[in-house]
Image: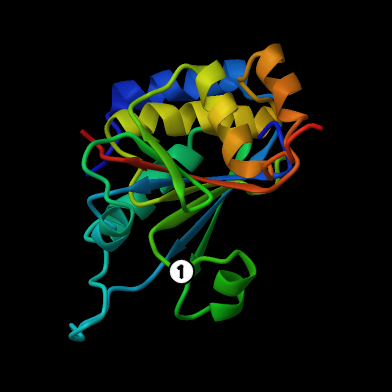
Amino acid sequence: MASPHVRADVVEAQEFMDLAQRYRVRGVPKIVINEVHWFEGAAPEATFIERLLAAANPPQPEAE
Amino acid sequence: MAIISAVDQETLRERFAREMEGDVTILHFTKAPSRLLIPGHQPDSPYLQQTEQLLREVADLSEHITLEIHDVRQEPEAAERWAIERVPATILVGPPEGRLRFFGIPAGYEFAAFVDDLIAAANGQSRLSEASRESLEGLRGDAHIQVFVTPT
């Protein structure tokens, strides 16, 4: 809700087992960002935000 | 038979009255049960009717909450407009304009989160800390977050 760049889906894994399989959900909560980044378990807020930025921001070119 | 007990309904009613300042629309997508089981197709979620009933009960507890129900088979344009491919799907539309979606039934522990989100969506408020919100301003790409949960 805090950023217009972010869209969040909560998916109940037992009803959508094909999705749970696609993302290899073994334990919950499992958080998947932009299809490829993921982590399991409830992370503290600051860690979550860090991971979100790492996943969504394009990699920085190396500084000279 | 109600899904939410009378006591819980009263508790929720009071909480919404105290905490909800704005309006929120619960946009719910479902489909009428199919009588055919087509091999190779994803079977329908067994919770379609319960989810609908649960949402109706929640919507009745506050004038700030509007419930809109769409059948994806009868209204394919609505499903496409909101990019809904699976049901039951529930989108919270408040000032954040529907960027929070739930797939499946928001039951068990998820129900508490759902209620919190409903209030936050109505009030257009994020529950993140100031520091988090500032960090988020550094977000340059788009992020699609999927949180996989179970009701127990």
From the viewer's perspective, is residue A61 above or below residue B9?
below
Q: Is residue B19 left or right of residue B61?
A: right
Point out residue A46 in the picture as x, y percentages from the top left corner: 56, 17
Q: Is residue B62 visible?
A: no
From the viewer's perspective, is residue B68 above or below residue B22?
below
Q: Nearer the viewer, residue B71 or A7?
A: A7
Q: Is residue B22 left or right of residue B27?
A: right
Q: Nearer the viewer, residue B62 or B112?
A: B112
Point out residue B102 in the picture as x, y percentages from the top left corner: 45, 47
Could you tell me which residue is drawn at 71 percent across and 30 percent down? B124
From the viewer's perspective, is residue A39 above or below residue B37?
above
Q: Chain of mark 1?
A: B
**Res B89 → quadrant:** bottom left
Q: Residue furthest right?
A: A64
Q: Quadrant of the image for the N terminus of chain A?
A: top right
Could you tell me which residue is drawn at 51 percent across and 20 percent down? A47
- Looking at the rendered structure, the kind of residue marked 1 is Glu
Report the label total: 1
Point out residue B9 in the picture as x, y percentages from the top left corner: 38, 27
Q: Residues within 10 Å of mark 1 (few under 14, many from 20)?
A: few
* Secondary structure of residue under mark 1: loop
Q: Is residue A26 visible?
A: yes
Q: Quadrant of the image for the C terminus of chain A?
A: top right
From the viewer's perspective, is residue B11 above or below residue B69?
above
Point out residue B31 in the picture as x, y percentages from the top left corner: 38, 71
Could you tell me which residue is drawn at 26 percent across and 73 percent down? B42
Could you tell me which residue is drawn at 28 percent across and 53 percent down? A20
Residue placed under numbered mark 1 in the picture: B85
Color scheme of the displayed model: rainbow
Q: Is residue A17 left or right of residue B87?
A: left
